[in-house]
Every structure is written in structure tokens, then in C-alpha cells.
Image (spheres, rainbow, N blue to C red):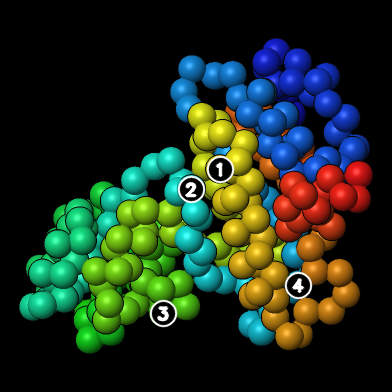
Amino acid sequence: MTHGKRFSDSLKRFDRTNLYAPAEAIELVRSMAATKFDETIELAVRLGVDPRHADQIVRGTVVLPAGTGRTNRVAVFAAGENAAAARAAGADVVGADDLVARIEKENFLEFDIAIATPDLMAQVGKLGRLLGPRGLMPNAKTGTVTTDVGKAVTEFKGGRVEYRTDRYGNVHVPIGKASFVTAQLLDNMRALVDELVRAKPAAAKGRYLRSVTLCSTMGPGVKIDPARARLSEEDLAAIA
């Protein structure tokens, strides 16, 4: 693969084989995010799981304490009081059968998160071929099928993000923007890593956090020492 001059110059600024402390990696990645737009900072974690087995798929959501730096467009499938609660919480689109029909007939997909109440999942299930491939199908495991739609809308509008292992056992999650200060990205990174460790499947054997890599939208990946990914700055200073 051929990279541009900016990317190639960035590769010369650090040792690609080194395992960095979290704060050091974040500062490196932020310094290399030099484009005109506010690049997204993404954490990639390779887990010691085999997603070919259903009991080793790692999936869920986590609230990032410093937010994501973007506001999700949220669609809610709900009726009655639940629909009113969704609107009050700031949902961008709210509907029941009418919203299902709009998506089905008009291919309306101008939202990032879809939330549904359990009683409407039978209708929402008809949209599987449209929502499924785009990762938009509501699911109880990710908190997007719920009776407390107001809380769900508030959290997804704020800093709640979804994670799921791909077929190779990797998890890719945005943890903020290059404009965030290092402390905010550290808080978000640790919240995510703590959640992944909490969600470790009982069937997973051997080393669980295989590798941790941080990168910006247009920048190269910087490797983080997995053994230090959950430690506070005080902990890191004590073992330095």
C-alpha cells in the first residue's frame, strides 16, 4: 500500500515496534493528527477469543466519560408514553408502524443508532435486511431494546458506544477526537478497556488482551502495552 507524505513522515516520529504507555501513545497520536478536520481517535484491541463460537463473541456498550466528540442521530421505535419520553430526551426520529413503513418504503436511514421498545420488535424485525448489514438493528445485548427509552436516548446522545468483536477477535471503537485533551482520551480508553475485561467470556483461554493499538483517522497506529492499558498515571509512575 502506498501512503502519502504526511503519513510517511509520521512513521518516522516513533518506533513502530515499541509498546508505549497509554498517555505517551495518546500524545503521539494527537500530535500526528495534523489534517484540517478534527480527526477521530480510535482504539483497536485484539482479544484472545474465537468469535466462530457464539460463547466467545464479545459484544455490548460502554459509556465514555468524556463523550465521543460527536452527537449521534437517534431513531426510536416506540408508541404512547415511551414515544413521548423518547422525544423529551432528544431523539431525532420517533415512530412506530409509521417509522417502520418509512424505512421500508423510502429507505430512510438517516440515523446512527436505533432504539426500540420490546413490544415493537416484531415490526422492527421486518427491517432486518436493511438495518442488520448497517449495524442498526436494535438488540437487547447493546441496550437498544429497552423499556427505558428516555435513558437510552440520553446515553447514546452523550457518550455511550457499542463494541463487538469482528471475525478475527478485534474490537474497534472511537474514543474521542484529536481536539480532546490527553486526560479525556485516557479516561475514555480506560473505561473501554475495563468494560472489555469485564465482558471476558468464561470460555476464553490464555492471554485475553493480545494487543492494543491507538490511531487517528488519517494517522498510523501506535502500540500500547496491554499490561499497562488499565493502569492510572500514579500506577505507571510507581513502576517506571
- Identified by mark 2, the residue type is Ala
Q: Where is mark 1, residue-wise?
A: 184
Q: Mark 3 near mark 1, Cβ–Cβ under 8 Å?
A: no
Q: Mark 1 near mark 2, Cβ–Cβ under 8 Å?
A: yes
Marks 1/2: CA–CA distance: 6 Å
Using the rendered image of the protein, determine whether residue 130 is visible from the camera's viewpoint: no
Marks 4/1: CA–CA distance: 29 Å
Quadrant of the image occupied by residue 52 = bottom right
Marks 2/3: CA–CA distance: 24 Å
Residue 185 rendering spot, x and y as whole percentages:
59, 43
Give the mark, 1 or 2, whose residue is nearer the N terminus.
Answer: 2
Quadrant of the image occupied by residue 184 = top right
The secondary structure type at the circle numbered 2 is loop
Kindly report which numbered mark, 2 or 3, lies closer to the viewer in this rendering: 2
Q: Residue at x 34, y 50 (%)?
A: 72
Residue 228 rendering spot, x and y as whole percentages:
81, 53
Q: Residue at x 36, y 59 (%)?
A: 156
Residue 170 rendering spot, x and y as whole percentages:
69, 59
- Identified by mark 4, the residue type is Val
Q: Where is mark 3, residue-wise?
A: 140
The relative height of residue 113 versus residue 214 in the rendered view (above or below) is below
Q: Where is mark 4, residue-wise?
A: 49
- Identified by mark 3, the residue type is Ala
Q: Where is mark 2, residue-wise?
A: 66
Marks 4/3: CA–CA distance: 22 Å
